[in-house]
Amino acid sequence: MRFKNKRLMALVACTALILASCHHTASESGGPVPAIEGIDWTLIELNGKPAAKGANGKPASLTLTAAGTRANGYAGCNTFFGSYTLTGSALKFGLLGMTRMACADAGALESAYTKALEATTSQRLKGGKLELLAGAVVIARFEK
């Protein structure tokens, strides 16, 4: 009987480790990669083109915070905030709120960027860069 309990305990421990690792996404080679949360990501590409700078030359950004699954960042003029759901490589943003400052030249960037966040269905890390995808299409690329 004692042997079965040790096997059961080992099985439970292995299951717990597997479930704990599910939060990580899969790399191109199929192995685990570091989490994307808790990192300040800078937008470098949007809809296949280099991302424009926002007001005062500041780039758009994104931070995903695991505690409370909160997303926030800078959209080119205004800051945004909201929720997200991350399950494996699937990523979906909830409703996003935004400050309402007026900026002369950042409206196009802000509109395109927030539309990309709304369209996001998944994410992946590729070459150390975070990619947001809508289906199979990369719609935004970030670097640390």
Image (spheres, rainbow, N blue to C red):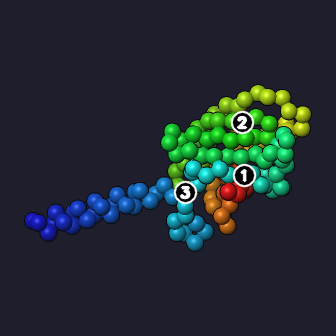
Residue drawn at (14%, 69%) of the image:
3
Residue 41 coordinates in the image, percent (x, y): 68, 52
What residue is shown with label 3?
Answer: 35
**Residue 11 occupies quadrant:** bottom left
Q: Count the marks: how many? A: 3
Instruction: Tell me if residue 50 comes above or below residue 32 in the rendering.
Output: above
Q: CA distance from mark 1 to mark 2?
A: 13 Å
Is 91 in front, or is 65? 65
What residue is shown with label 2?
Answer: 79
What residue is shown with label 1?
Answer: 42
Instruction: Tell me if residue 39 comes above or below residue 84 in the rendering.
Output: below
What crowding class fits label 2: few (fewer than 14 Cα within 10 Å), some (14-19), or many (20 or more)? Answer: some
Q: CA distance from mark 3 to mark 1?
A: 16 Å
Mark closer to the chain start, 3 or 1: 3
Q: CA distance from mark 3 to mark 2?
A: 23 Å
Q: Is 98 on the left-hand or right-hand side of 122?
A: right
Does the CB distance between marks 3 and 1 fall below 8 Å? no
Q: Is 99 on the left-hand or right-hand side of 4?
A: right
Is 14 in front, or is 122? 14
Q: Inspect the image, locate mark 1, and give the three-letter code of the amino acid beneath it.
A: Thr
Residue drawn at (64%, 40%) of the image:
72
Residue 142 coordinates in the image, percent (x, y): 71, 55
**Residue 141 occupies quadrant:** bottom right
Does the CB distance between marks 3 and 2 fall below 8 Å? no
Is 65 in front, or is 124? 65
Residue 46 seen in render:
yes
Q: Is 117 on the left-hand or right-hand side of 21?
A: right
